[in-house]
Amino acid sequence: MLIDVVQSFVFYVMGLVAFGLELWAFVDCLRHRPNAFEAASKRTKPFWLALTGGAAAVGLITVLSGSPGGLGLFGLIAVTASSVYLADVRPAVRETGRGGNRSTGPYGPW
């Protein structure tokens, strides 16, 4: 009986963490300019907005469902899509958004 309560609590916390990750990816995608995505050769902004927005919606449904398994495979796909955005697309878009006309040395701008 206690094991079921602990297991449900752990799955709920994992769902909240996953939803936070998916929401972070979506909000970060909203903040960047559309031309920064093309300049970084990372598809388009509407593509990433749809992907991260869909992932956040799946994460919200998973958290609100309250069941230990959540949405299972769909939840895993949503976390993976958000993680790809945060690990690959976000750094490339941020780098192109900074502009290249500043003088930078080996330890930063001078």
Image (cartoon, rainbow, N blue to C red):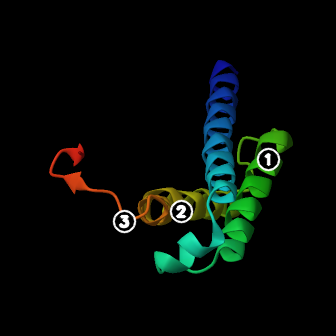
Name which quarter of the figure residue 81 lies in: bottom right
Q: Residues within 10 Å of mark 3 (few under 14, many from 20)?
A: few
User: Label for residue 60?
Assistant: 1
| Amino acid beneath label 2 | Tyr
Q: Which of 57 and 93 is in front in this view?
A: 93
Furthest residue in direction left, as rendered: 106
Q: Name the residue under label 2.
A: 85
Local SS, label 3: loop
Left or right, residue 104 beside residue 7: left
Query: Residue at the spot x=72%, y=41% of the render?
Result: 68
Q: Disc 2 versus disc 3: distance between alpha carbons?
A: 23 Å
**Precedes in sequence: disc 2 or disc 3:** 2
In this image, 97 relative to 95: left or right? right
Q: How far apart are marks 3 and 1 (CA)?
A: 38 Å
Q: In which quarter of the image is residue 82?
A: bottom right
What x and y, as percent, mark residue 24?
63, 46
| Residue marked by disc 3 | 100
- Cα separation, mark 1 vs mark 2, equals 18 Å
Residue type for callout 3: Gly
Q: Is mark 2 on a helix, strand or loop?
A: helix
Categorize mark 2 by other alpha carbons within 10 Å: few (<14), some (14-19), many (20+): many
Lower sequence index among marks 1 and 2: 1
